[in-house]
Amino acid sequence: MTSLSVEMLAADAAEPITSAGNAQLGIAVLAGIAVIVLLITKLKMHAFLALTIGSLALGSFAGAAPADTIASFTAGLGSTVAGVGVLIALGAILGKLLADSGGADQVVDTILAKASGRAMPWAMVLIASIIGLPLFFEVGIVLMIPVVLLVAKRGNYSLMRIGIPALAGLSVMHGLIPPHPGPLVAIDALDANLGVTLALGVLVAVPTVIIAGPVFSRYAARWVDIKPPENMIPQRPSEELDRRPSFGATLATILLPVCLMLLNALVEIVVDDPANGLQKVTMVIGSPLIALLAAVLVGMFTLGRAAGFTKGRLAGTVEKSLAPIAGILLIVGAGGGFKQTLIDAGVGQMILDFSENWSIPALLLGWLIAVAIRLATGSATVATISAAGLVAPLAADMSTSHAALLVLAVGAGSLFFSHVNDAGFWLVKEYFGMNVGQTVKTWSVMETIISVVAMAFILLLSLLL
């Protein structure tokens, strides 16, 4: 297919694919989401296939021609992967370098050496938040679990007193802070400013992670008082290395992309002149692509070479980092296709009409939609992508700060009450040696606290900005 054909396809997809009324569209949306939920939960189908089939079902229920639905889905998939695919890949490479070089272990050991007693839960939340910045949630858990179990065992702490702060730090980063896939896709769908979203996300994340982590862990430890399971303490990556990166170099590498993106946002606010030389420079180095690429290139030296990696091993690390994210990229892409099908079917206008008639604030509406999809599918990423597509029209007339807050509201909703249809639920249950009831009392409640507290702070910021 030529580039001209692709452009024509995208242009065609931008036009409404159906003239169905709001009632039919509402039924079509519910039916499309129901198809996705049933395929994921009952048939255990991969989310990529479920989202693809659900998008086609949505178009059919809305009365659209099959060719138009396919055009919308493929256009949305292509634009989403083009917008965030490279960023997800770069984030995966940086995370793999951090893990394999022993840099993550270096951060952990340095902070733990300075903490003891009552400070330990706070140290755990700090470690998890730092480690969670460049890593996917599942990778972060795998890295943090050995530390959590060892600290709990050696210090004779309740596992929940140490584990909940670590899980809270990882979860908040995953749901609210780019470059994680969910926030990135929501930023792209809502056309929000990444730097502003990152800055506001950090403002929301800090008090949220404190309340859901160290504070809640006191109660979780009383409800579920268990010891670390001996058989779940795996070997740490750095135990096989002769040397590993320094704490300062590792921390600087992790924070480099964050600092570059925040610098760009700050210059945009202070200078506010696209023709200004400084702003031109920061727009380039603070763009997500360049910021993450810079961190990866720097990390090859500060992490890989510092750990004694040869050129061949560095190349192997990069190669191994990309294979596991194939599924994530496909899910994100299919989610973008579902989002575009929703928009082209006219669902966006229906949501606008609904919000006007019922006077539901856009931020609360985005959060509620994400909560509903999260409870149904169990996937925070699917919930973020779908909800962002549904509320995208509401962001059209928003200020830069409120569009960023809408991204965060959707992200907060996507974390609500993880339960048995969420892979993360079972991951935490097995690693911590809990039964289902204990996991609900601790992990599920913690996720709900994150969602509700984050939303409260988002609403507070919307009043101040």
Image: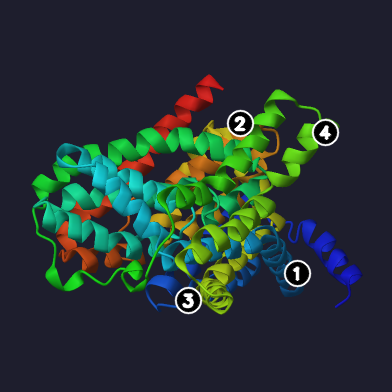
Q: Earlier in the sequence, mark 3 or mark 1?
A: 3
Here the colouring is rainbow
Q: Which residue is mark 1?
A: 71
Q: Residue at x 31, y 59 (%)?
A: 144
Mark 4, mark 1: which one is toward the viewer?
A: 4
Q: Do the residues under discs 4 and 1 have CB atoms within 8 angstroms?
A: no
The foreground one among 299 and 378 is: 299
Question: Pointer 3: what residue?
Answer: 46
Mark 4–mark 1 distance (CA, rounded to whole Å)? 41 Å
Rendered view: 330 above or below 455? below
Q: CA distance from mark 3 to mark 1?
A: 22 Å
Crowding at label 1, few (<14), some or many (≥20) Cα neighbours within 10 Å? many
Mark 2, other Cα within 10 Å: few <14 / some 14–19 / many ≥20: some
Considering the numbered disc 4 on the image, is that residue within a helix, a strand or a loop? Answer: helix
Indicate which disc, 2 or 4, sits on the residue closer to the N terminus: 4
Residue that carries the numbered disc 2 in the rendered image: 401
Instruction: Please determine whether, in this image, residue 293 is positioned above or below residue 59.
Output: above
Q: Amino acid at mark 1?
A: Ala
Q: Earlier in the sequence, mark 4 or mark 1?
A: 1
The number of numbered discs placed on residues in the rendered structure image is 4
Q: Which residue is mark 4?
A: 277
Question: The disc labelled 4 sits on which kind of residue?
Answer: Gly
For the point 38% across and 43% down, the residue is 451
Please give the name of the residue rendered at 44% of the width and 66% of the height, measured from the top-left corner: 101
Where residue 401 appears, as percent x and y from the top left, is: 61, 31
State the image coordinates of residue 73 (x, y, percent, origin top left): 68, 67
Q: Dots 2 and 4: beta carbons under 8 Å? A: no
What SS does tag 3 mark?
loop
**What amino acid type should be assigned to the residue bearing mark 3?**
His
Q: Amino acid at mark 2?
A: Ser
Q: Are marks 3 and 2 in contact (CB under 8 Å)?
A: no
